[in-house]
Image: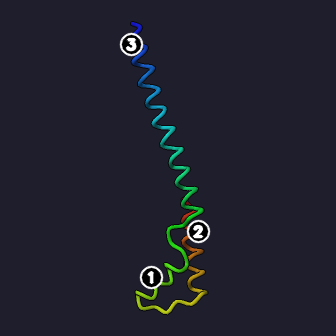
Amino acid sequence: MDWLWFVLVGVVCLLAGAALGFFIARKTMMNYLKKNPPIDEQMLRVMMMQMGQNPSQKKINQMMKAMQKQQDKK
C-alpha cells in the first residue's frame, strides 16, 4: 500500500509542476513580447513600401497603436 501512495504523490507532483511551469513560461513570454515587440516602426514602414504604399508618420503611428491595442486585449 505504501508504494501506491508513493506513485500517486509522484504523479500529482509531476502534473502540478508541469502546470506551474506552463503558466510561468507563458507569463514570462508575454512580458518579453510586451517589452520587445516583434514589429517596430521601421519594419512596418518597409512592409508598407513593399506593398506599394507611401507611408506617412501618422499612418505608421495609427498602425502601431492598433497593434498595441490588439496585443493588450490578449
Query: In this view of the protein, which residue sits in the foreground, 32 or 16?
Result: 32
Q: Considering the numbered disc 2 on the image, is that residue within a helix, a strand or a loop?
A: helix
Q: Considering the numbered disc 3 on the image, is that residue within a helix, a strand or a loop?
A: helix
Crowding near pointer 2: few (<14 within 10 Å), some, many (20+)? few
Query: Who comes first in sequence, dot 3 or dot 1?
Result: 3
* Residue shown at the point (49%, 93%) measured from the top left: 54
Provide residue 26's location: percent of width, then percent of height: 51, 49
Q: CA distance from mark 3 to mark 2?
A: 51 Å
Q: Considering the numbered disc 1 on the image, is that residue within a helix, a strand or a loop?
A: helix
Query: Who comes first in sequence, dot 3 or dot 2?
Result: 3
**Does the residue at mark 1 contact the one at mark 2 (Cβ under 8 Å)?**
no
Question: Image quadrant for the C terminus?
Answer: bottom right
* Residue shown at the point (44%, 29%) measured from the top left: 14
Task: Name which quarter of the figure residue 31 lies in.
Answer: bottom right
Q: CA distance from mark 1 to mark 2?
A: 20 Å
The residue labelled by disc 1 is 47
Q: Is residue 29 positioned above or below 65 on the image?
A: above
In the image, which disc is placed on residue 4?
A: 3
The answer to whether residue 37 is left or right of residue 9 is right
Task: Name which quarter of the figure residue 8 lies in.
Answer: top left
